[in-house]
Amino acid sequence: MDELNELSQWLTYSEAVTFKVALLSLLLAFALSQAVGAAYVWTFRGMSYSRSFVQTVALGSIIAAMLMLAINNSIAAGLGIAGSLAIIRFRTAMRDPRDMVFVFASMGAGIASGLRAYEAAVLGTLIFCLASVLLAWSEFGTQRIYDGLVRFSAPANAETEVAVSKALRGCTRQFALVTLREVAQGDAMEHAYQVRFGEVSRRHALLQALEAVDGVQDVTL
C-alpha cells in the first residue's frame, strides 16, 4: 500500500501555479507568437496568403501555454490531456512545409512559456524570427535559372551563322540547337535554340541582338 501511495503521489505531484505566473506565461506566449506571425507576414512569398493562418499562429501558443500550465509537472494530468487531444482530428492540409514550421515555432514558444522557461522562449523566438527574415532577405535556396526556346529564320550562309552564334554567346549563359530546317525553298533556315539566361534582363538583349543580324526575321522567345 505504501508503494502504491508513493506512486500515486509521484504521478499527481504538481506545484501550485499562482495567478501572476499564469498571467505572465500566457501574455508572454501571445507576444512571442505575434512576433512569429509578423515574421511570417514579412517573409511570405507566394500567392495563397491567408490571414486566418497568421491569426492561428498568433493564437496557438496561448493554447500550448495553457496546457503546460494545466499539466504543471503532473504526469497523470499530462497523460489525460494527451489522450484528450488524441481524440481531435485536425484535417487542415498545409500545402507549404514552411507554414508547418511557423506553426511549430508558435507552439514551441507557448510550451516554453507554459513551462516557465522564459529565457528559452524569448531567445528561441528571437533567433527563429531573425533566421526567417535573413533567409528571406538573402533569398536562400533560390535558383536563378531562366530557360526559354528562341525561334527565328535567317539566310542560309556562313556569315549569318557566325553573327547568330555571337549574339547567342553574348546574351545567354548556355544555348543548344534544337531544330534546324529549310524554309523559303532553301533560301533561309528556321532555327530553334534552347537558351539559358543568367539574368532576366538578358532576354530583351538577346531579341535585340538577333534582330540586328542582317536577314534574321520572325524572332520569338
Image (tube, grey):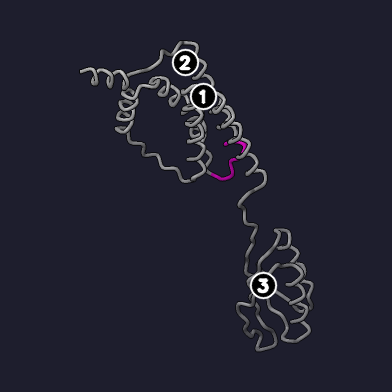
| Magenta residue span | 40-47
Q: Residues within 10 Å of mark 2 (few under 14, many from 20)?
A: some
Q: Which residue is depicted at the point 39% across and 22% down?
A: 73
Residue 207 in sight from this viewpoint = no
Where in the figure is residue 82, as x and y percent of width and height? 33, 30
Q: Earlier in the sequence, mark 3 or mark 1?
A: 1
The question of residue 45 being in magenta is answered with yes
Q: Which mark is residue 175?
A: 3
Give the left or right position of residue 177, taking residue 111 as reference.
right
Q: Going from the N terminus, do you reach mark 2 or mark 3 first?
A: 2
The label shown at residue 22 is 2
The answer to whether residue 124 is magenta is no
- Tally of numbered tags: 3
Residue that badge 1 annotates: 117
Badge nearest the viewer, 2 or 3: 2
SS at circle 3: strand
Residue 109 x, y percent position in the rendering: 51, 29
